[in-house]
Image: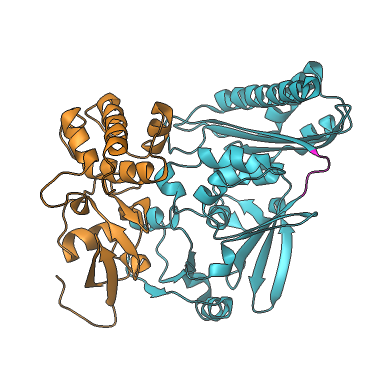
């Protein structure tokens, strides 16, 4: 947590994973680093840091965005959801479980971003087709899986969430 | 990565924006969706000392449709355009899904993209094909100019330091039968166009072209409108022979540069193929509406 408060820092207040948190940030601090360094939630990964890979994807007011390309001050008084908010009471979110079951990750680096994009997809479209899934995750790069098992995992999760309406 | 330090302002009214622009002028940059500006600042290709975040100006993110045309607020996000219904303006829905990737489209705005003036950007080509204008405001007043006047050079527009682009104005189609295609060659999802071609055609009931527009991305130092080609088209019946002639003409209007995305020769060829392919698809679509 940064402790310095002067003219160059601003207080940023966000509701992150349902919890209100505050932290000081220089205006040039990007949301990804605010989440990781200031709020201590390191589940959000920084991959390319050039708006290409989507590893840093978080939900900003329920829309998936690249948090390396949003300033923390732009998120002031907004709602953020990260991968840490998916699990409830030590039970994985159906999407997390489906990634596990379908071998939807190998190194796992892209997974937090991939999951957040998928969460937003299934909120809007509970029964996506394969091409809709591939379109939705086209801003998230994975260099291990070849995407096949990721698509399978998201499809699997959409079926299971339909059977047992869980919280998304 | 992080940008150079800057002073940050988040005004809530256009009046405050005017004041900041008058105070800081060239030192300031306007931040809309930030999907081009922030990456450039992180790479230190841009280092404004003042950033004016206009994300709080709520009245710039809506659209107004009248008989004369469609007015789109500068802060309308690509995603909102992608998911909107634009019966009289099908080129909007054709183009939006090709912009960057879904995550970027959730943040990026139409006004920001135009003010950034990347010659390879998709909106430049599409809105030139639609013969759109932009509204530019400052304390002094509002002025309107065509997009062609607005795009001056690579990343350079007619915006003065004290001005802000507030709206995009698209004239209504000339007939009830309007058709559009956006064709883009990209190396991967999210990349800029190797070549992009936007086509809008208004047909009369007997298949005469009442109005046409062709805009091209990455075919010049600015987004390019293929005027000579549209003048070949207007007043004629859309036929395979005319399509051939138009495609040969359109690619010659461009002057692309060879770069890592492809040689100038390749881009010329792709522009020709895209114009031919797009117009052919429009012809087929029109024929199917006739037989239906």
| Residue B180 location (% of width, % of height) | 69, 34
Say which of A44 and A85 sits in front: A85
* Residue for point 49% across, 68% down: B54
Say which of A28 and A56 sits in front: A56
Q: Quadrant of the N terminus of chain B?
A: bottom left
| Residue B48 location (% of width, % of height) | 42, 67
Q: Is residue B254 magenta?
A: no
Please state the extent of the stretch shown in magenta in the rendering.
B172-176
Which quarter of the figure has residue B220? top right
Viewer can see residue B222: no
In the picture, measured across the screen, residue B43 lies left or right of residue B195, that is left
Which quarter of the figure has residue B181? top right
Instruction: Note whether B222 is above or below B75 in the view shown.
Output: above
* Residue for point 30% across, 60% down: A80
In the picture, measured across the screen, residue A20 lies left or right of residue A79, that is left
| Residue B205 location (% of width, % of height) | 87, 30
* Residue for point 16% across, 33% down: A100
Viewer can see residue B70: yes
Say which of B136 and B150 sits in front: B136
Q: Residue furthest front?
A: A164
Instruction: Note whether B147 is above or below B240 in the view shown.
Output: below
In the picture, measured across the screen, residue B233 lies left or right of residue A137, that is right
| Residue A29 location (% of width, % of height) | 28, 65
In the picture, measured across the screen, residue A82 lies left or right of residue B118, that is left
Q: Which chain is orange?
A: A
Report the number of discs.
Answer: 0
Q: Residue furthest left?
A: A90
- Magenta stretch, main secondary structure, is loop
Say which of A42 and A104 sits in front: A104
* Residue for point 48% across, 39% down: B192
Q: Colour of chain B?
A: cyan
Q: Quadrant of the C terminus of chain B?
A: top right
């Amino acid at each position: 947590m940064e402790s310095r408060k002067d003219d160059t820092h601003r207080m940023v207040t966000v509701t992150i994973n349902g919890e209100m948190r505050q932290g000081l940030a220089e205006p040039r601090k990007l949301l990804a680093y605010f989440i990781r360094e200031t709020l201590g939630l390191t589940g959000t990964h920084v991959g390319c840091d050039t708006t290409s890979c989507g590893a840093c994807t978080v939900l900003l007011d329920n829309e998936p965005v690249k948090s390396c390309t949003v300033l923390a001050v732009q998120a002031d008084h907004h709602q953020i959801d990260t991968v840490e908010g998916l699990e409830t009471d030590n039970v994985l979110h159906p999407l997390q479980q489906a990634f596990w079951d379908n071998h939807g990750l190998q190194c796992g680096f892209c997974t937090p971003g991939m999951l957040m994009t998928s969460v937003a997809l299934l909120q809007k479209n509970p029964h996506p087709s394969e091409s809709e899934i591939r379109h939705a995750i086209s801003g998230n790069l994975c260099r291990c899986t070849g995407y096949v098992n990721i698509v399978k995992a998201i499809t699997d999760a959409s079926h299971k969430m339909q059977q047992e309406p869980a919280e998304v | 990565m992080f940008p150079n330090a800057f002073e940050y302002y988040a005004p809530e009214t256009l009046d405050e924006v005017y004041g900041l622009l008058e105070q800081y002028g060239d030192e300031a940059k306007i931040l809309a969706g930030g999907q081009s500006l922030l990456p450039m600042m992180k790479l230190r290709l841009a280092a404004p000392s003042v950033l004016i975040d206009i994300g709080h100006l709520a009245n710039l993110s809506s659209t107004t449709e009248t008989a004369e045309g469609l007015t789109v607020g500068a802060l309308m996000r690509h995603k909102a355009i992608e998911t909107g219904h634009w019966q009289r303006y099908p080129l909007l829905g054709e183009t939006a899904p090709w912009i960057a990737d879904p995550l970027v489209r959730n943040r990026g705005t139409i006004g920001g993209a135009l003010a950034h003036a990347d010659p390879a950007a998709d909106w430049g080509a599409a809105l030139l094909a639609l013969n759109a204008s932009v509204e530019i405001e400052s304390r002094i007043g509002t002025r309107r100019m065509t997009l062609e006047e607005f795009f001056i050079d690579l990343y350079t527009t007619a915006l003065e330091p004290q001005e802000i682009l507030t709206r995009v104005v698209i004239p209504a189609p000339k007939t009830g039968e309007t058709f559009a295609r956006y064709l883009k060659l990209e190396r991967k999802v999210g990349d800029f166009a190797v070549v992009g071609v936007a086509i809008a055609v208004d047909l009369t009931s007997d298949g005469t072209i009442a109005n046409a527009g062709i805009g091209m991305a990455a075919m010049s130092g600015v987004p390019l409108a293929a005027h000579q080609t549209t003048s070949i088209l207007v007043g004629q019946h859309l036929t395979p022979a005319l399509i051939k002639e138009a495609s040969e003409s359109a690619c010659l209007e461009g002057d692309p540069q060879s770069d890592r995305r492809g040689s100038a020769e390749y881009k010329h060829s792709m522009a020709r193929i895209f114009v031919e392919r797009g117009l052919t698809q429009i012809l087929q679509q029109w024929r199917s509406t006739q037989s239906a």
